[in-house]
């Protein structure tokens, strides 16, 4: 039988290392890489009308406007390409359009759409995204506390914090731009992960009712093992589906699918190895405090 209580420090070590590396990368790189959704900028959607290499388009953009900071070029549906840059003036946009028309034999109709996002709007999106995440976390804490007890509610929220920090760390380490799809993925994973945790907590509660004299650590271990097959099967089947979406999907879908993949792995890890351990830790701590109070009053 899998024992998650005795070696829980080791189970906590791996995610702590990832989070620590993420924090170091965050500090060294001066924060996260923000997509146009948050940082503001210009997005151009172009139908190349032919097979092309992303590197050739990237080179053309950089040679035409050498002062641009980290422009990105992404392949989209069919022969379409998406170019994302810092905000472009009308003259800069016309210059880039002319250069691409000349180099790749395009026409004015090839430029399907151009979007400009103001930095102020990006700041508002960040604020709303943070508020949505915090509200979701508070609601989860209240729900779990009402359904179980305050210790389990705190344990569940800590597991959710773990999932979010792992996702943020991966993005900080690999310098992946954060956008609105990432925020949507975080909220999705919060819902998915809390569901997996509730399944474990339900079994813990059931086993406690059957034998209240049993050691709580043993009850947690037994409950996690009883739900282990369900947790693994659910995660694997979901991962297979979302991985196919990532492999076969267009750029916009991949931006959503990748953080979901990371979050699914983090959520499965936390629901199996961490959430029950957190509850057991808080339970044992409260029992020790009660014993100390009894000794003082005796």
Image: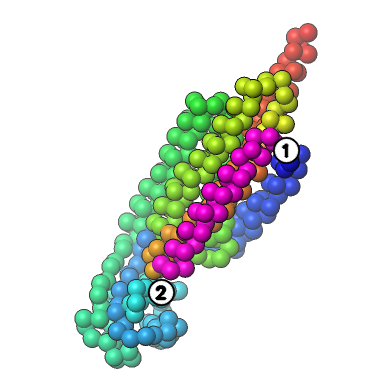
Measured along the vertical axis of the image, is residue 52 above or below residue 206? below
Which residue is tagged 1?
Answer: 5
| Residue at the extreme top of the image, as rendered | 298
Measured along the vertical axis of the image, is residue 4 above or below residue 182? above
Specify start and end residues of the magenta stretch as a single range: 221-249
Residue at disc 2, secondary structure: strand
Residue 273 horizontal/vertical position (percent)? 65, 44
In the picture provided, is 158 more to the left or to the right than 192? right
Q: Quadrant of the C terminus?
A: top right
User: Residues under labels 1 and 2: Cα distance?
Assistant: 46 Å
Residue 62 horizontal/vertical position (percent)? 41, 82
- Quadrant of the rendered image containing residue 112: bottom left
Please name the residue shown 29% across and 79% down the image. Answer: 47
Q: Nearer the viewer, residue 124 or 264?
A: 264
Mark 2 packing: few (<14 Cα in 10 Å), some, or many (20+)? Answer: some
Which residue is tagged 2?
Answer: 74
Q: Do we see residue 208 in this rendering? A: yes
Q: Do we see residue 34 in this rendering? A: no
Residue 210: say if magenta: no
Q: Nearer the viewer, residue 220 or 259?
A: 220
Residue 16, disc: none
Please name the residue shown 51% across and 40% down the image. Answer: 194
Q: Main secondary structure of the magenta part?
A: helix
Please name the residue shown 48% across and 48% down the image. Answer: 189
């Amino acid at each position: 039988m899998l024992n998650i209580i005795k070696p829980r420090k080791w189970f906590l070590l791996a995610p702590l290392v990832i989070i620590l590396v993420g924090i170091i990368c965050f500090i060294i790189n001066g924060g996260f890489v923000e997509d146009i959704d948050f940082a503001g900028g210009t997005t151009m959607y172009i139908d190349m009308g032919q097979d092309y290499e992303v590197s050739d388009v990237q080179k053309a953009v950089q040679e035409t406007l050498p002062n641009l900071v980290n422009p990105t070029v992404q392949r989209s549906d069919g022969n379409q390409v998406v170019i994302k840059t810092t905000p472009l003036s009308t003259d800069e946009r016309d210059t880039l359009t002319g250069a691409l028309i000349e180099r790749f034999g395009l026409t004015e109709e090839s430029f399907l759409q151009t979007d400009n996002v103001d930095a102020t709007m990006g700041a508002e999106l960040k604020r709303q995204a943070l508020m949505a995440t915090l509200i979701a976390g508070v609601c989860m804490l209240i729900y779990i506390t009402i359904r179980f007890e305050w210790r389990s509610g705190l344990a569940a929220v800590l597991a959710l914090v773990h999932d979010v920090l792992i996702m943020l760390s991966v993005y900080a380490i690999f310098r992946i731009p954060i956008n609105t799809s990432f925020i949507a993925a975080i909220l999705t994973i919060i819902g998915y992960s809390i569901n997996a945790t509730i399944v474990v907590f339900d079994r813990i509660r059931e086993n406690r009712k059957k034998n209240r004299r049993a050691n709580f650590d043993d009850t947690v271990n037994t409950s996690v093992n009883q739900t282990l097959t369900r947790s693994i099967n659910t995660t694997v089947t979901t991962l297979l589906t979302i991985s196919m979406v990532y492999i076969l999907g267009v750029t916009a879908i991949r931006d959503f699918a990748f953080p979901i993949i990371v979050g699914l792995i983090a959520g499965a890890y936390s629901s199996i190895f961490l959430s029950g351990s957190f509850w057991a830790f808080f339970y044992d701590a409260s029992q020790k405090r009660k014993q100390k109070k009894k000794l003082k009053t005796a």
